[in-house]
Amino acid sequence: MYFSRIRIKPEIFKSTELALLLSESSYNMHRLLWDLFSDEKQRNFLYREEIAREQLGTQVGVRGEPIYYVISSTKPFSENPFFQVEAKEYQPKLQKGDRLSFKLRANPVMTEKVDRKNPEYFLKERSRREVANKNKLTKKRVRHDVVMNAQKIFLTALCAELNLQSHLSSAPQKKEYKKVLLTHGGLALDERLTTFLKDNFRYSERLRQSMQLHNKLEWSMKAIVDDALEKWMVKQGERHGFSLAKDDNNQCKLQNSTYRWHSIKADKGIKSGFSSVDFLGDLEITDVEKFTKALFGGIGRAKAFGCGLMLVRRI
């Protein structure tokens, strides 16, 4: 395996069109980075984008342009019209019980099985496949964004608890939930959020400040998201051979930041996208083989678009 640091050549930014192409979307960058491995028929690399100035300090010629860290099974081509490539072999020596600090930009999603609304139509569409029991409700997999799903569940539960469903439309979005709660929740909502924050070790001290109701709602939603993302990371650890380290209060050493939505306009004009979250924390290796596979193969989804690469260093 190889670990590479890749910078865009300074002269590229002298061309407005090229600079726009590079910054327009993750999809464009994915295609350009693939050119560094053009002999490969399948993607064999992970990458993470950072800001050069934050990584390299005040070196001459360093500005706010992106810089890329890449892990690949083959060495990237050094001769490229767009990039400056620095590559070295990457074979970390790891043992069970090793403690590492880590940085991870991931696409946190969860998959849920739900009953299909029209099982008869589904069975007809899959008529070529053998079905053991055609009277049984079939299931489909639905993928949820962990952050948005946690917020929706929390806001829905609050509205139900305070009997505010009558103020909602048939298909409310997050903005509508918040408006209804802040408009009609009153003292009951304030007491509920105060109790919730008081019991949260991360945000209880916020109550010492003079907060308006909308501030309490925002901090409560942040606490809900923190909990959901921590549970997601714990599951990733179980799957990939590590556990999150704990502090003196038996709390996971984990922080999250920079929730972003990345739009992708792929071929044929199809628009889609994905979310990403930056994680920072400490871990302990529980299974060297699984963990090494995760370092080389990535964690979570959207690996082709800059997610999944875990950067580690010894504590």
Image (cartoon, rainbow, N blue to C red):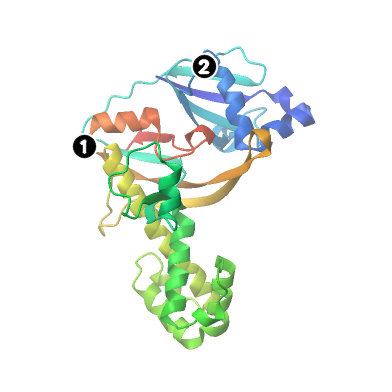
Across and down, in percent, residue 234 comes to 31, 49
Quadrant containing the C terminus is top left
Read off the residue under disc 2: 76
- Hey, what amino acid is under mark 1? Gly
Q: Please identify the quarter of the rendering in which residue 242 is found.
A: top left
Q: Which mark is residue 166?
A: none
Residue for point 25% across, 57% down? 250
Across and down, in percent, residue 145 comes to 47, 52
- Hey, what amino acid is under mark 2? Pro
Question: Vertical placement of 104 versus 38: above or below?
Answer: below
Question: For mark 2, does the 10 Å Cα neighbourhood hold few (<14), some (14 to 19), or many (20 or more) residues?
Answer: many
Residue that extends furthest to the bottom in the rendered view of this protein? 187
Residue 48 visible in the shown view: no
Of tags 2 and 1, which is closer to the observer?
2
Question: Vertical placement of 10 versus 271: above or below?
Answer: above
Quadrant containing the N terminus is top left
Along the line of sight, which residue is nearer the eye, 140 or 128? 128
Answer with mark 2 or mark 1, whichever residue precedes in sequence. 2
Q: Please identify the quarter of the rendering in which residue 19 is found.
A: top right
Question: For mark 1, does the 10 Å Cα neighbourhood hold few (<14), some (14 to 19), or many (20 or more) residues?
Answer: some
Q: Please identify the quarter of the rendering in which residue 77 is found.
A: top right
- Secondary structure type for disc 2: loop
Q: How many marks?
A: 2
Read off the residue under disc 1: 97
The answer for how far apart the CA atoms under marks 2 and 1 are is 32 Å
- Left or right: where 119 falls relative to 249: right
Across and down, in percent, residue 156 comes to 46, 71
Along the line of sight, which residue is nearer the eye, 280 or 1? 1
Residue for point 41% across, 80% down? 161
Residue for point 47% across, 35% down? 303
Along the line of sight, which residue is nearer the eye, 53 or 283? 283
